[in-house]
Image: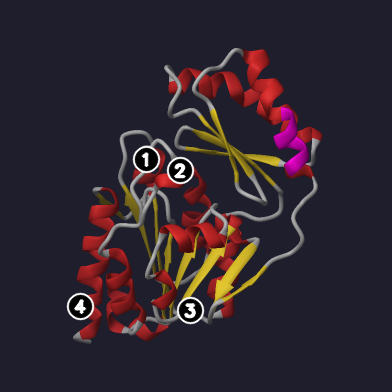
Amino acid sequence: MEAILKDPGGAVIGLDFDGTLSPIVPDPASARIHPEAPAVLAALGERVRAIAIVTGRPVATALELGPGLADVPGLVVLGHYGFERWEDGRISAPPPPAGVPRAEAELPLLLDSLGLQGVTVEDKGRAVAVHTRRAADPEGALATLRQPLAGLAAKHGLVVEPGRMVLELRPPGMDKGHALGLFLAERSARSVMFVGDDLGDLAAFDAVEQSGLPGVTVCSGSAEVTRLAERADIVVDGPEGVVALLGELATAVSRS
């Protein structure tokens, strides 16, 4: 943190979206960014080298669920774990992988064969997520799904990304760590902070450690995922704690 405070103009602030800037909710479509987050990020964006939201969400969805984000100075949104990029109002991305819609088409029959109730499927364009949060036994449903979904993913050239009561089928070759590492190099960062809450953010923590830069890892704490908290330099209490920490950082760097 000291390096960021001494030289904010060299700092990249990386952030997950769900569970970090937005509270986790049963229906992913109803998620909304913490109401104070855009203003806090805007204040911070005026002082640091860049702010990057690195999320498994499609870029357009993250911006829709985060009104005000498009006005944050210097913001870059790396969606689909870095396959998509939004910057200065423009989205760039490679063509969607053919395996995702094929796997999604087979999911209803697979779920029926397993006799699972309350499991929902989210079409994310370049990925498809299977959520168990609404099931009677979310953890049991997740355990039942792991092996069948791994087989389905392999069949269509995809990989499975585990998360908080969710298993996501997506293309291989990119994760949050790879996306963050490339961004740090692109921006010639001199320090880095990454804030996350879920298993997919472990790769970003790895990227912070492997970057060779002064770095800070922050966990938006949850009772569902403890591995991130065990790795983090700082643990805060969910999105409310994340926004408070970023607000304190914005105030501190404005005085530097």
Residue type, numbered disc 4: Ala
Name the quadrant of the N terminus. Answer: bottom left
Numbered label attached to residue 87: none
In this view, 101 is above or below 248: above
Q: Which residues are magenta?
A: 101-106
Residue at image mark 4: 252
Cβ atoms at labels 4 and 3 below 8 Å apart: no
Residue type, numbered disc 2: Pro
* Magenta span: chief secondary structure: helix
Q: Is residue 177 located in the magenta-colored stretch of the structure?
A: no
Residue at image mark 3: 189
Distance of mark 4 from mark 3, alpha carbons? 19 Å
Examine the image and state in which quarter residue 101 appears.
top right
Q: Is residue 105 located in the magenta-colored stretch of the structure?
A: yes
Residue at image mark 1: 25
| Earlier sequence position, callout 2 versus callout 4 | 2
Cβ atoms at labels 1 and 2 below 8 Å apart: yes
Q: Position of residue 155 (x, y in %)?
A: 80, 33
Q: Position of residue 79 (x, y in %)?
A: 57, 60
Residue at image mark 2: 28
Query: Is 162 left or right of 42, judged from the image as shown?
Result: right
Cβ atoms at labels 3 and 1 below 8 Å apart: no
| Earlier sequence position, callout 3 versus callout 2 | 2
Q: Residues within 10 Å of mark 2 (few under 14, many from 20)?
A: some
Query: Is 210 left or right of 250, judged from the image as shown?
Result: right
